[in-house]
Amino acid sequence: MASQQLLRQKKKPTKIITTEQQSLVLVKRLLAISVSCITYMRGLFPESSYGTRYLDDLCLKILREDKSCLGSLQIVKWIQGCFDALEKQYVSVFFTFLNGVSFFFINNHTEFVTGLCSKDVKQASRRLLRTLYLLMQNLRPLPNDITLTMKLLYYNDVTPEDYQPPGFKEDTGSGDLLFGGDPVNLRVGSVSTDFHLMKVKVTTDKKRMRKADSNLIQKNGPTEISYQGLDCEEEEEEESCLNFVSDQTEL
């Protein structure tokens, strides 16, 4: 009589974020994945500039050091500079501007939500990334002439006046951006631990949107914009992606 053996896949034990270092790893991962998502979904760089990771059923494309593409190398350098500012607890806002679409990554280590379990954090991370992917699919195609800028804002009370992260230089322009047309403010999501709160917001001209979930739209958005560690299964890669994927802290 034939017998059938049921094989049960062993699940990795979920590690709870109990230290500030583990929380920092999470924020770094979310930032790197989000910027990678923006550049990939907007078609900025070739496929060779990305590695592949999976978060459950979500396929993630992560920027890596592709020496054949100087543009992607520059973005990787910027992200690594952001990591430096994060580790020193200097940075409050990561701002990326891509042809009329602004992306705000707000890092706050003073207004976080306490008492959240690891499951809550992981679900919030998934929701944020899925929403960002969906939003990128609903933006109109970029023109041939593409400009991408990344800016950082710091906590003035702790950041040395002469501090500049690797890959960055002092911004001598104004602190505000003016949008023409009809700006739309979109809430992508937020993830909070006992140590950090990261929010992602997008502002764009309404004409650039194909459609958007009404729940994402912030009503009466201002025309003047003032600045105020995921559990991924790795594929075999010849070149490693950004350093954050080598950290072993999981949600």
Image (cartoon, rainbow, N blue to C red):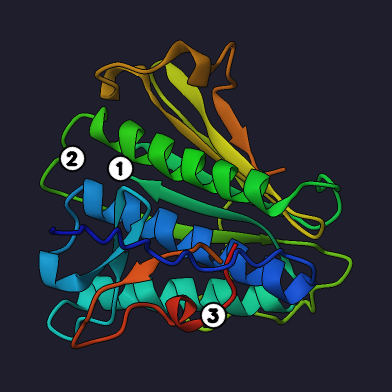
Image point (51%, 68%), residue name = 12
| Residue 63 x/y as whole percent | 30, 69
**Amino acid beneath label 2:** Leu
83 or 6, nearer to the observer: 6
Real-space Cα separation, disc 2 to disc 1, in angstroms:
7 Å
Mark 2 residue crowding within 10 angstroms, few (<14) / some (14–19) / many (20+): some
- Label 1: state its secondary structure: loop
* Marks 3 and 2 close (CB-CB < 8 Å): no
Precedes in sequence: disc 3 or disc 2? 2
Q: Left of 20 or right of it: where is 26?
A: left
Residue 217 in view in this figure: yes
Q: Left of 162 or right of it: where is 32?
A: left
Mark toward the viewer: 3 or 1? 3
139 over 162 or under it: above or below: above
Real-space Cα separation, disc 3 to disc 2, in angstroms:
36 Å
- The residue carrying mark 2 is 142
Image point (30%, 84%), residue name = 240
* Marks 2 and 1 close (CB-CB < 8 Å): yes
- The residue carrying mark 1 is 99
| Residue 214 x/y as whole percent | 46, 11
On-image quarter of the C terminus = bottom right
Q: Quadrant of residue 133?
A: top left
- The residue carrying mark 3 is 248
Q: Left of 173 or right of it: where is 89?
A: right
Real-space Cα separation, disc 3 to disc 1, in angstroms:
36 Å
Mark 1 residue crowding within 10 angstroms, few (<14) / some (14–19) / many (20+): few
Image point (58%, 42%), residue name = 124
| Residue 185 x/y as whole percent | 51, 24
Image point (77%, 46%), residue name = 116
Precedes in sequence: disc 2 or disc 1? 1
